Amino acid sequence: MSNLSNAKITRFREDKRLAVISAIRSLSLVGLLITMVFCIFTYREDLNITNIKRIISYIDHVTFEGSQTDTFPFDAGLNTSYKAFDVGIATCSGGSFRFIPPFENMDYSKQIKYSNPYMRVSGNSILVYDLGGTGISRLSSYSLLYETTLKSNILSLSANLSGECSVITDEAGFRTALTVFDKRLKDVYKWQTSDHFAFLSALSPNAKTAAVLCIGQKDGASDTYIRYQPTDGEECKITIDLGNRDVYSMEYYSNRLLMVLCEDGIYAYDNDGALKASAAFTSGSLVAFNHGAESLCAISLKGTKGDSSDVKVFDGECKEIYSGTFDGDIRSIALSGSTLAFISGKELYKVDLASQAAENVELSGVRDVLITETGSVAAVYSDSAKIVSFEKGE
């Protein structure tokens, strides 16, 4: 007994696991609260009872019911316009807009009576406009946000990633006009001209400058030039002379350079109109391209030898980061992030720009190709788009 009484007794340490779990739970609740506040602040203009119910139904469907689908069905027709948008695909034809997510029976549709609808993704929304008509609408994946009707016909529309857009119209009493709209489709700047014929524009990331592509005559020959129109009402002080080049696309990149895609090359100009970089197309003729307001441009050039085409990708400094030669004519090009996809004959190709690895599958009846937000390649048919598997044997 004496030995037992003299023995040292080791006490158990206090169990703090419950306290740690409680602290983690508190942090999670704080994080959830911060996320909710952020979402409410960021998307406050979109929130209403209808939209909240639809968002809840999305979450409920995905969490408790939903099985994802790899097919996005839409109305058949040659006039159907489509874009990869949000987690799915947006289409517009037959007088209505549809957002098709990768979940069955969860489509959102809205009647939009545009005879020639085109779409432009702008930030977390999408702009639908009637080319040759007068209507513009901004939509999310679950709601019509804003809409406006112009007094003149739309010749072209461009938008930056912040949601503002610039529109060239065929203005009565003038040659053309440029109008800049904010996120709510309220006009914040307008430039009407009888001296310049404008047909294309690009809006800077901060919306303070609209680059306007104009065409005229100089010494009896056609002359193409770009005017930097300040959207605060100041006079234009910068003009870029492009000579008689044919211009296919203009986009402001995230590095604030204006990238101009021409028939003979791609050119990068800074805010002062100075040429900062360029890449010439030394052989072949431009056939197809994909040029968005990001930092990359993909093109295809008809090869000079046999039935082949060259596919090239340029970064925001006009550096060639990918080049490949493929059989046949390239009919469509999609580009998103580090993924490039295109159609050549009956072959659909996918290229990982990081590894330069190319994969292909043979498909019939494909009319276009899209890349979804998740990086999946979708083949577009006359009445649907379908995610393509590049696994052999599938």
Image (tube, rainbow, N blue to C red):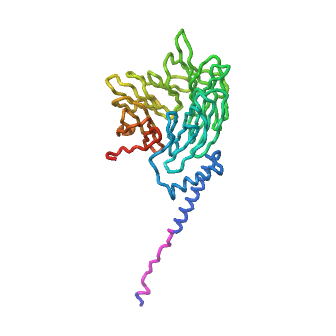
Q: Residue furthest bottom?
A: 1
Residue 198 point in image, percent of width and height? 59, 22
Q: Is residue 96 visible?
A: yes
Q: Is residue 209 visible?
A: no
Q: Is residue 308 above or below residue 110?
A: above
| Displayed quadrant of residue 323 | top left
Q: Residue at x 39, y 34 (%)?
A: 343
Q: Quadrant of the N terminus?
A: bottom left
Residue 90 point in image, percent of width and height? 53, 41
Residue 195 point in image, percent of width and height? 63, 16
Q: Residue at x 46, y 33 (%)?
A: 296
74 relative to 284 in the view: left or right:
right
**Nearer to the camera, 40 or 342:** 342
**Nearer to the camera, 386 or 336:** 386
**Nearer to the camera, 111 or 85:** 111
Q: Is residue 174 above or below residue 156?
A: above
* 5 inside magenta stretch: yes
| Displayed quadrant of residue 137 | top right
Q: Is residue 147 above or below residue 191?
A: below
Q: Main secondary structure of the magenta part?
A: loop
58 relative to 232 in the view: left or right:
left
Residue 199 point in image, percent of width and height? 57, 23
**Nearer to the camera, 8 or 150:** 150
Q: Residue at x 51, y 54 (%)?
A: 62
Q: Is residue 238 above or below residue 39?
A: above
User: Which region of the structure is painted magenta?
Assistant: 4-17
* 205 inside magenta stretch: no
